[in-house]
Image: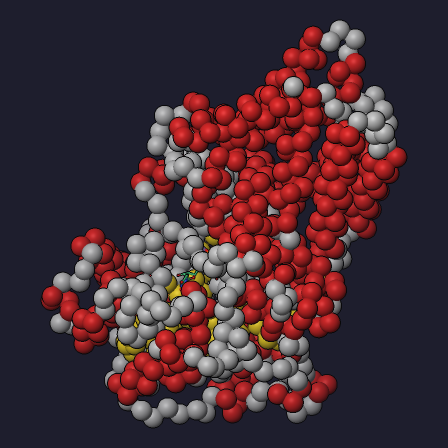
Amino acid sequence: MGNRSDYLPLFETKSSRRHFLLKLYVLSIFAAICMIWVYRVSYLPVEGVLERWTWIGMFFAELWFSFYWFITHLVRWNPIYRYTFRDRLSRRYEKDLPRVDIFVCTVDPEMEPPIMVINTVLSMMAYDYPPEKLSVYLSDDGVSELTFYGMLEASRFSKYWLPFCKKFNIEPRSPEAYFQTALEPLDDPVKAKEWLFIKENHKLYGDMKNRIEVTSKLGQVSEEIRKEHKGFSEWDSVSSPRDHLTIVQILIDGRDPQTMDNEGQHLPTLVYLSREKRPQYPHNFKAGAMNALIRVSSRISKGPIIMNVDCDMYSNNSNSLRDALCFFMDEEKGHEIGYIQYPQAMENVTKNDLYGNSLNVIFEMEFPGIDANGGPMYIGTGCFHRRVNLCERKHSNEHIVDWKRVTEIKIEQSARALEEECKVLASCTYEENTQWGKEVGLKYGYLLDDGMTGFSIRCRGWRSVYFNPERKAFLGLAPTTLLQTLTQHTRWSEGEFQILLSRHGPFFDGYKKIPLKLLLSYCIYFLWAANCFATLYYVIVPSLCLLRGISLFPKASSAWIQAFAYAIIANRAYGLVEFLCCDGTFQGWWNDQRIWMFKRTTSYLFGFCDTILKMLGFANPAFVVTAKVASEDASERYEQEIMEFGTPSPMFNILATLALLNMFSFAGGIKTVISDAENKVLDLFASQIILSGLIVLINLPVYQGLFFRKDSGRIPNSVTYKSLVVSVLACSIALY
Ligand SMILES: O=c1ccn([C@@H]2O[C@H](COP(=O)(O)OP(=O)(O)O[C@H]3O[C@H](CO)[C@@H](O)[C@H](O)[C@H]3O)[C@@H](O)[C@H]2O)c(=O)[nH]1
Ligand SMILES: [Mn+2]
């Protein structure tokens, strides 16, 4: 850049201020909320201990909701959106593009089938990027021969697949996803020629898929296949997934002039890694895998840019790598950017998103606002990092990278020698007495290692960027049963809460180094777990009080009720419109309301309690992996949007108890209204009756699961009995 004045940025940021009418609307909700506080304070019951304390409880719950409401709107106030200029990037830097190392993690060949994993790997290899500068690493924590076999097949198939992708510039570049959507062109002769290629590749892919699936079904690799690659012999010494030596296999050595695709072009480097594991050493889950990958890749390719994806998150947009570089390499602002986070979009959510898994509102509405307030957190998959950043370095302007120099690193050893060296780097003992997991690499000891790592990167002065291009960068798989969804959210809410309370979290390290506005924005997620109490209070206490005859809301005939009604209805309406704007359906919104309640009364409660227990030293953090496949009839029910219970779980006990409790109190409320001639009861208790009525309405799928369904996804009898006993007991205590 000779002259500053003709500097053209590689990306731009546009802010979109919310319309002032919308702001007015939000402020009007705030006014109603204030009225609620005034009401609570001025009408505090003077008589009756129970009356008084339940009232105070309501007040606290409402204060909590108000605070939470406040931070969600703080985030939404002035969102920003980013745009990149890839043409400028390639004009200025095409020859000097940095090496990029892509890390894919997998852990279990049954929950994460090899064919899915290699589709992700192939889509990464097919990025629109110079192949000699691209390396894809797979970390296999399951040390599975089947996954390795899949990788071997992928390395062969890539010789056809990559030239095909580039020749016809297709999207998406995961073969499975591509062939699902590819349609035969009937009228266009040019396209018809292309179709021949597509058919040829489809057949190659189909054959490969078949081989991999047959082997997966067998559960082991046949003797014939074993002879095809020296790597299989490494499994001779593997006794169990928790007890084995490191396995490193460079399946494609990008430096080797002999390894070309079938059109004579270079191929990206492809590496399989399964780090050493021993029962006596903690393996630190995904963070441990990532750190091993960081070290191994620093020997093999040493890309200054690192990207991490989950094994189910294939690349849906072959430009996202260049997009990310537009941020890092921007001459003016790039040097302060530590990482670029893409949203997690889900491929498998059904039309009405029964389990509220699409996360669209978070990624379309909240993250652009968080970006404006200072930058998103690192949420694991779909994030580009600077390598220096993960190897601990404070941000300072002296470290401006000269991109033209970084690429010059030459690695001379043979692939064999590199593999041997890497074995040491990925061994259990390597990290002993080092700063890995503390100051260097991803942090250990946290359930959300990525969240904590991102937070500390921010504390060191780097900025982060959120980028959400029109064509989604990655598509992954959301859980497909209720229990999996709730379990995933237990892990997330617990992990977020753990960061909040940690010694390196916002209260200790964070508050001086991160602007308050950003900390409050992060609090939406940090406080997920803490949300459980106010919600539990609101779904239990008003209904029990209805049975007991304690009124907790203004009379239907009083003016105060309008404040409550307005605050609640206006807020829900806002949420509904927002939901519809994010491509949701009305039914989807309703489902989301249900899942909102389910999560808050189960996942978040468990997350909260677990965090506290772990802080007191009663339990160790453990990562429950989300399955990416389900049984046949469960998948069928998922497609039909029928709620899946099936197995007994304490979470279902809670859900069923709450549903029954509200059903009883709603019935009780209606009964007293009918028997009351003067309509006094209705005036006093209308709000509580409506509240439990709404809870009953939202719980309809639970009653179905309890009493009306016969299939294997219904609520198990043991859960039904337990929850009946508890809810009847609670109601009788309230009545007498
Ligand atoms: O011991 C482990 C456990 C998990 N994983 C991998 O970690 C990824 C995420 O696991 P998954 O069960 O799919 O969890 P999700 O809740 O779907 O993942 C989200 O949440 C995680 C943190 O809880 C982040 O790390 C992920 O990037 C983010 O997509 C997967 O690729 C796993 O193979 C490992 O490599 N080793
Ligand atoms: Mn996942």
Query: Which residue occupies the foreground of this view, 11 or 671?
Result: 671
Vertical comparison of 91 with 586: above or below: below
Res 715 quadrant in image: top left
Q: Is residue 576 visible?
A: no
Q: Residue at x 85, y 29 (%)?
A: 46
Q: Residue at x 49, y 45 (%)?
A: 486
412 relative to 507 in the view: left or right? left
**Residue lying furthest right:** 42
Res 425 quadrant in image: bottom left
68 relative to 32 in the view: left or right? left
List x then y, in percent, for residue 485. 48, 46
- Ligand 2 is located in which of the four quadrants? bottom left
Q: Is residue 519 visible?
A: yes
636 relative to 71 in the view: left or right? left
Query: Which residue occupies the foreground of this view, 207 or 89?
Result: 207
Q: How many marks?
A: 0
159 relative to 319 in the view: left or right? left
Q: Residue at x 36, y 25 (%)?
A: 710
